């Protein structure tokens, strides 16, 4: 690893990229947080889950819709409405313009969002929501096109997510070993992970963790948590799946996180709350920065260009986030992840469930994605 720690990486970014900022260290820390989110999103893309994804969506608590929580990524049951080719001269690709390209859409143009899938300067909006109501979310995703045209998919997503993914990275002030914000942010993430799904965790007096789930008859079913979780994911029963949401956390090290083998209180709080908790290693984050942002090959230079252009000190110039990104950078990232997927998957350590693998998480997500959700949620 080129940097002995993520702290050293942040100091390098503070010095070399964010020197213009009033609080350069904080700006560098936020940028590293953005990189963790981008790595997570393009991992999901590489796992062919992008067309189930909504970004930054407010989700209600289980059986308590008055309280909602914003989650970074949610994965929803998805079905295709259209697959379209659009001439490159037809930019920008607005929600209303895409509406006109569809055959008999069942919502009105005036109710479409004021969003743009692709701007005139090829700024891409990932998982671009075109329209939504209580029963569906209409989302457009840009696919690889040709020299003269863009290809896009329009999907109908059900509002209930079968999984959520949240990235948690906490920084501390220079020279401070501990800060109240670290445990509070961990608690916030833990609360959301526990509140979203019908499958709740309860700890017995001997420390064993059980899952408890209300049945259609009003009774409570409870079993050892990990085996119950497996039963639900593999089930086809509406009574088990209807309000179930798998929670996945991605934690990254910064100062007080220690390592995946040396858990402090914050990491323990997250580990006991998420169904899956992944630890993005310092080596993995450093490899991403070194390979794509510091010394990229020619085919990946668009990634560095988008990153550098985003941090000039000018407002409104960010072209490198999970929500919006330069199309050239998006295509380069897709190629990098496709060519190096097994290497990238090795950047993550599984904190919980113990002894499991990234391949098993991928299998569970695809198993949930492929269920007959229309029947389950009827």
Image (cartoon, rainbow, N blue to C red):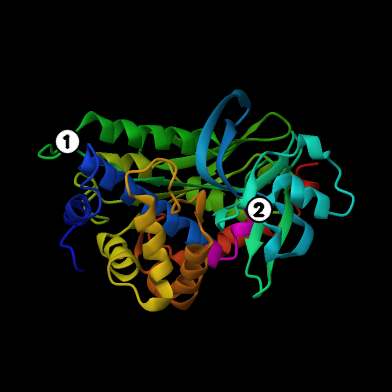
Magenta residues: mostly which secondary structure?
helix
Q: Is residue 238 left or right of residue 314?
A: right
The residue sitting at 36% across, 77% down in the picture is 297
Element carrying mark 1: loop
Inspect the magenta stretch and tell me whether residue 162 lies in it: no
Q: Quadrant of the N terminus?
A: bottom left
Q: Which residues are magenta?
A: 45-52
Specify whether residue 174 is in view: yes
Give how far across and how far down residue 144 sits, in percent: 62, 69
The residue sitting at 64% across, 75% down in the picture is 147
Badge 2 is on which residue?
92
Is 148 or 58 nearer to us in this picture?
Answer: 148
Question: From this viewpoint, which residue is outermost toward the right?
Answer: 104
Give how far across and how far down residue 191 sits, in percent: 44, 32
Q: Compared to 292, does 12 lie above or below?
A: above
What is the number of the mark on residue 20? none
Q: Quadrant of the C terminus?
A: top right
Question: From this viewpoint, which residue is outermost toward the top?
Answer: 66
The residue sitting at 26% across, 47% down in the picture is 28
Quarter of image, res 212 = top right
Element carrying mark 2: loop
Specify whether residue 351 is in view: no
Badge 1 is on which residue?
178
Is 242 or 149 nearer to us in this picture?
Answer: 149
Sequence-earlier tag: 1 or 2: 2
């Amino acid at each position: 690893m080129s940097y002995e720690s993520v702290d050293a990486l942040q100091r390098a970014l503070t010095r070399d990229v964010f020197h213009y900022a009033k609080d350069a260290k904080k700006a560098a820390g936020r940028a590293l947080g953005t990189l963790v989110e981008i790595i997570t999103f393009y991992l999901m893309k590489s796992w062919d889950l992008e067309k189930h994804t909504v970004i930054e969506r407010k989700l209600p608590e289980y059986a308590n819709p008055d309280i909602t929580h914003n989650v970074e990524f949610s994965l929803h049951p998805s079905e295709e409405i259209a697959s379209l080719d659009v001439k490159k001269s037809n930019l920008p690709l607005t929600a209303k313009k895409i509406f006109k390209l569809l055959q008999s859409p069942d919502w009105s143009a005036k109710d479409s969002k004021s969003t743009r899938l692709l701007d005139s300067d090829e700024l891409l909006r990932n998982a671009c929501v075109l329209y939504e109501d209580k029963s569906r979310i209409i989302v457009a995703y840009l696919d690889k096109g040709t020299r003269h045209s863009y290809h896009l998919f329009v999907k109908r997503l059900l509002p209930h997510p079968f999984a959520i993914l949240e990235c948690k990275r906490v920084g501390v002030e220079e020279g401070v070993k501990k800060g109240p914000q670290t445990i509070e942010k961990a608690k916030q993430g833990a609360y959301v992970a526990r509140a979203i799904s019908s499958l709740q965790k309860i700890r017995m007096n001997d420390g064993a963790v059980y899952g408890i789930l209300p049945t259609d008859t009003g009774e409570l079913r409870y079993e050892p948590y990990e085996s119950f979780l497996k039963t639900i994911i593999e089930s086809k029963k509406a009574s088990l799946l209807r309000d179930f949401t798998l929670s996945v956390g991605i934690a990254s090290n910064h100062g007080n996180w220690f390592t995946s083998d040396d858990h402090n209180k914050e990491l323990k709080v997250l580990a006991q709350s998420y169904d899956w908790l992944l630890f993005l290693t310092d080596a993995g984050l450093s490899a991403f920065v070194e390979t794509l942002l510091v010394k990229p090959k020619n085919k990946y230079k668009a990634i560095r260009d988008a990153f550098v252009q985003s941090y000039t000190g000018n407002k409104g110039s960010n072209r490198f986030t999970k929500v919006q990104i330069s199309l050239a950078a998006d295509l380069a990232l897709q190629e990098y992840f496709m060519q190096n997927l097994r290497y990238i998957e090795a950047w993550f350590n599984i904190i919980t469930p113990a002894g499991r693998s990234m391949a098993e998480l991928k299998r569970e997500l695809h198993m949930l994605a492929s269920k007959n959700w229309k029947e389950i949620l009827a």
